[in-house]
Image (tube, rainbow, N blue to C red):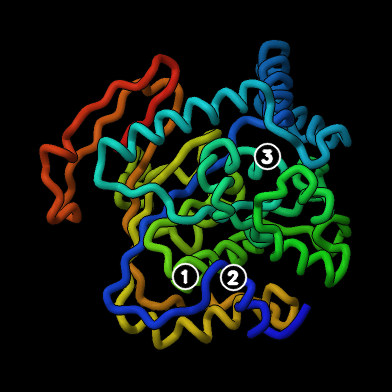
Amino acid sequence: VGTGKDRLSRLPTKLKTPTFPEHRIVYLVRHAEAEHNVEEKRVVKAEMQATGDKDAAESARKSTLKNPDFFAAQLSSAGFNQVLERQRSFSQFFRGTHYPPPEVVYVSPLERTLQTASLLFPQHIEEKRIFAFEFLREKRTGLPCDERMRADMIKLGFPKIDLSDVFAVDEAGSSGYVFREELRENNEDVGRRAGCLLDLIMAQDYASVAVVTHKGFLRELLQGPWRDIRQHHPDEDGCSAAVFGNTEVRICELTCNQNYQQNRNSSVNAWVQAYLGEDDGCATKSKPPVTVQERSLKCGFDRPSMIVKAQASDRGVPRSRLARRQTAQAGGGVHMA
């Protein structure tokens, strides 16, 4: 696969020398409803109606996910409609606020996330600004729905998505597309993997980035490496929810100081080494000083309108523009809380 330096050269842009403080806008996106999600909901509903037993319903849900037909699960018909509605409301959001569209999209190499990213960001597809990264994939459970195809097969369906990182993984062996018991992950494993995201984002020249991934990855990201951001929009338990709904988007604003640069190059190299199997961890044990502020961008279909509220960090942006209200088409919408 090559050295860590070779691996860094495959990233969308090379490492830069920044001015400080550095600022990033990150759009965290969960994929739209997939085929296995539909079946999960069906069996849970049926079990609850039949027995009212939540444990039995959870057992039925887990059992149905073992169906081999869900290998590399695709979006459901409703999922496709979700993404199209989200794409329209997202476009309205960018026109009505000071937030910029993402300059680049990072995506998990699983089918449902690739489909979501392609439909949600069609211009990025045409301009070849979508990059798949293996570490963004869902938790390795051994379930068919959490596995992917070989990189060459994925390329047939998504020829305009950059899969060089996925190809590099497959060139090293079959662990990316053939599950073995030693590849099984627990939540802590996913959290360590999610910790690599910050290093990737801060290593690039892009001021705004979208990350399209999975419920499990996002949950462990917000409960682990980025757990502090959940305190900015608390709910009843004092923190915003870590679990994303299908096609839910949340905005995170990242600002780092010069201390980050002192650790960044070694952090990114450690990520490359860990990802290549040259180390048993990612450089996240002592995170560099980074302030992460979340903006909840709820994209539920039960929210037909969008209200953006000015906050203290919106310095220099006209409040009249931030307070602007837009009405989306029935059935879709974006809400900034």
Q: Which mark is on residue 112?
A: 3
Mark 2 or mark 3: name the one nearer the start of the chain. 2
Q: Residue furthest front?
A: 126
The residue shown at (41%, 78%) is 288
Mark 1 to mark 3 CA distance (whole Å): 25 Å
Rendered-image quadrant of the C terminus: top left
- In this orientation, does residue 219 appear? no
Q: Is residue 147 left or right of residue 117?
A: right
Residue identifier under label 2: 11
Q: What crowding class fits label 3: few (fewer than 14 Cα within 10 Å), some (14-19), or many (20 or more)? A: many
Mark 2 or mark 1: name the one nearer the start of the chain. 2
Residue identifier under label 1: 204
Under tag 3, what secondary structure? helix
Q: Amino acid at mark 3?
A: Arg
The residue shown at (48%, 64%) is 225
Vertical comparison of 49 with 131: above or below: above
